[in-house]
Amino acid sequence: MPSSSASSVGLSFQPDRPAGGYGARGGRKRRSWREGRWEPSLSLSRSRLPGRRGERVPLAGLALGGVTSSLGKHNFQQPHGMLLRCHLKRALPQKVSCRFCAVMGKLQSKLKHSTYKYRPDGFRDERIQTKAFQEYSPAHVDTVSVVAALNSDLCVSGGKDKTVVAYNWRTGNVVKRLKGHEREITKIACIHKSGQFFSASRDKTVMMWDLQGSSQPRQQFSGHTMVVTGLAVSPDTSQLCTGSRDNTLLLWDVGTGQCAERASVSRNLVTHLCWVPREPYILQTSEDKTIRLWDSRGLQVAHIFPAKQHIQTYCEVSEDGHKCISCSSGFGGEGCEATLWDIRQTRNRICEYEGHFQTVASCVFLPRALALMPVIATSSHDCKVKIWNQDSGGDTGSSPGLGGSHMPRSN
């Protein structure tokens, strides 16, 4: 065998047997001709093995020079006086199979598991058992579809179990469990600094709840003919806007529970609604790939942003009301972006945040107090939450695993 070429050789170890005995290939279990019991064999890979066809090679010399080094952490115990017969035959281009037959004894293999983790910088650290956050008893018995913050201590969630649950996220205690919907909860909107909130459902209704009152809904809003997929409360809490897959938006008087305005746009399947702070405007995303700005005074379309290439799944408005962000559906990195828009002046696209590989389900402006720069967070069906520099579009981190690709585009 030429020493200049690095051929791949397959090795199999088996007890020696007489000519015409059992036939077996390396790597499979086979029956021993002497004892009539199954004996495992071991398949390895090795380059530039010594010996010629039919040459007998001592196991000690081969194990130290070749087999041990190719196995890494496998340690072999060799019986005294064991010899190997090496048969080389060429099978594939640059690949040679070699069968070794042991004269006596049994070959044993032990695998040593590493107790270290290796870092890309070449250092190794001992594995440390991380302590998980404290877990509490589940608030729901089925899929949780939506969660919203009521105040600094309380959260409200809803899901497929048709139940709305208010709980203290600091202690894990359930404050109140509310039942009234007949189908899955789809959206929740809270009146901040109060105990009141709204829930929308696939049962085509919206209910208003009060933690200080009874377990029954304080108000019920019925008017849509399909699942309610959008919910927004006015800054003064006097009005409620709802949207649905029935292509309509309804404006309600919270005090009386009566519908004040109705608007319908063909193919406008609403995916989300949010109210612009200190303004009479409502931002809406749709499955028709558009973002609309509605004027609540008469419920008329005030502006339509340039259409996107994919369904717009979610939207959010900054605290100062100057900017908004929307996100898109997609797959394999096509679409899957979030877009920053100017609401007040040009109403054009400011920046795009690309780096997710599946549908971006939600996007939010993070409080300025949490970072030295204005940042945006996006969550996606690719199991990642990414944090973006709002101004530059840079991906400042992602979970799980910091870092990630980003391709910002700005106008």
Image: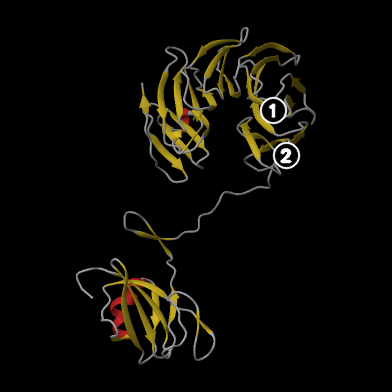
Return the disc, 2 or 1, that comes first in the chain's sequence.
Answer: 2
> Residue placed at 28% from the left, 82% from the top?
53
Q: Which mark is residue 349?
A: none
Q: Position of residue 110 (x, y in %)?
A: 44, 76
Q: Work out whether 320 lies above or below 29.
A: above
Q: Nearer the viewer, residue 141 or 42?
A: 42
Q: Position of residue 188 (x, y in %)?
A: 65, 29
**Left or right position of 309 against 90:** right
- Disc 2 residue type (three-letter): Asp
Q: Work out whether 154 lies above or below 7.
A: above
Task: Tell me the SS state at disc 1.
Answer: strand
Q: Residue 231 is drawn in which quadrant?
A: top right
Quadrant location of the C terminus in the rendered image: top left
Task: Tell me the SS state at disc 2.
Answer: loop
Quadrant location of the N terminus in the rendered image: bottom left
Q: Which mark is residue 199?
A: 1
Kindly identify which residue carries mark 2. 161
